Amino acid sequence: MGAFHTYDSDSDDDFEIETFVQKMNPPRVVVDNDSCPNATIIKVDSSANKNGILLEVVQVLIDLNLIITKGYITQDGEWFMDVFSVTDRDGHKLTNQVTIDKVESHIRKSLGADRSCMPSKRRSVDVATSTDYTVIELTGNDRPGLLSEVSAVLSDLNCNLVHVEIWTHNTRVAAVLHLTDQSTNSPVTDVERISKIRQRLNNVLKGGSDLSRGAKAFVQSVGCTKNVQRRLHELMNDDEDFEIDSQDVAGGESGGPTVMITNWNDKDYSVVTIRCKDRPKLLFDTVCALTDMRYVIFHGNVTIEGPEAYQEFYIRDVDGSRVKDEDRERVMHWLKSAIERRVSEGLKLELSTTDRAGLLSKLTRIFREHGLSVIRAEISSSEGKAISTFYVRDSNGDIVEQKRIETIREQLKEESVLRVEGQVQQTSKSTKRSSMNFLFGELFRAMSFLPGL
């Protein structure tokens, strides 16, 4: 079973036939605000069905920051139909015409022949160049302080990070970084400099141990990058961040996701059922996992029941077979891992500040000095502003003390505003705190910001 699915190149004849079919029966996208009182209904149907189309449609909805509250999926041969109930991030129907137009146009584009290219899979350190930035992909062993070390290396090499996403799961880490030259704001294209970046980052990933799993680096010109979170799933799958042991793979007892797979002999389907705590982008993660494992979803139902999400998929392998008995446990673990990667327990720190070089390296160093580990992060900069979100926890697994946060606040005072969400251990009985506060006063206002790992 491959780590992720790469589409085979279509022949010229196949491409012409698909184009002709689309012209004769163009895909339909209907945005309906009348049928449901509390959600917008999006209906998508097309006669140009192809494995992976469902993922592309869901990805469009996720990229537009829409919340999927219910879904119905069905396909039959060359035809498919998807119906989704969606809201905005605040739980409201879509009323903004600009957003509605984007939904329609982006879905139609995703159903066309102009599909995003599929990069080759590689491990540990990948570097590629686009017209706007250089792309670096990292995988390796996670450890406290890794974020700080990588950030310091890139700052020392005069690299400016435009966008960074990092995930950690089961002691593994994966990251996608978009960087430019600090002095020119253009992609780093010099072969020798790219080699130096790769070598320095490879040394950081090794952590001083030649025996570290996944520490060996590769450089691969992947040509272009797709959706970053789609790529992070592939990197984690390729790195096998899922664990298969003697524990009950169905899960559920510890509060984690429950995944079950049964074979429906009469219809030649395997039925996958998933129950877990609902959260944004859950459907994207599960559909992404099944697509990466080369399974086709023929029918599906997605519902939200209070705080819990229920998903049911009728699937077959791309070769038409059901899930084999010897693959069942692996598929269940793969799905659970895809769900868990985005679940981040701990404090959520949101920062918005002026974009200049140096801040991230200092910030992550301070996190490290105060015993905080970053378990997930998303950082981006645009038009002189930098926005970052960190999920952090105590390196020992304890709840972060408020006193520690206040110490960091004092160390970084008068520079910008940091929003903190999550549980903090009180330092005294008289101290009262809501689950969401704005800390650090004017933290980072005057300081520079280097978005980085």
Image: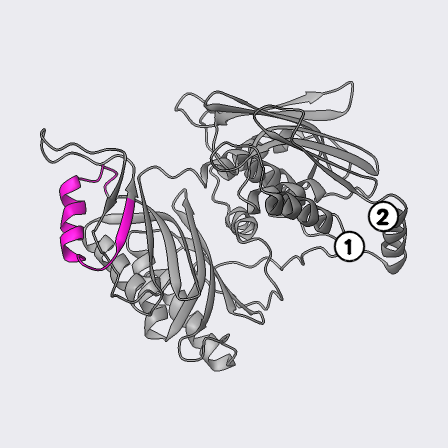
Where residue 43 sits: x, y (%)?
71, 34
Mark 1 / mark 2, whichever is N-terminal: 2
Point out the image quarter for the C terminus: bottom left
Amino acid beneath label 1: Ala
Residue that label 1 marks? 113
Up/down of 110 relative to 58, above or below: below
Residue that label 2 marks? 22
- Secondary structure under tag 1 reads loop
What residue span does the magenta drawing correspond to? 396-419
Residue 213 visible? The answer is no
Give the residue displayed 63% in from the left and 40% down from the top. Answer: 58
Where residue 196 sits: x, y (%)?
42, 76
Amino acid beneath label 2: Gln
Point out the image quarter for the N terminus: top right
Q: In this view, does 399 lie to the left or right of 250?
A: left
Q: How many labels does the image show?
A: 2
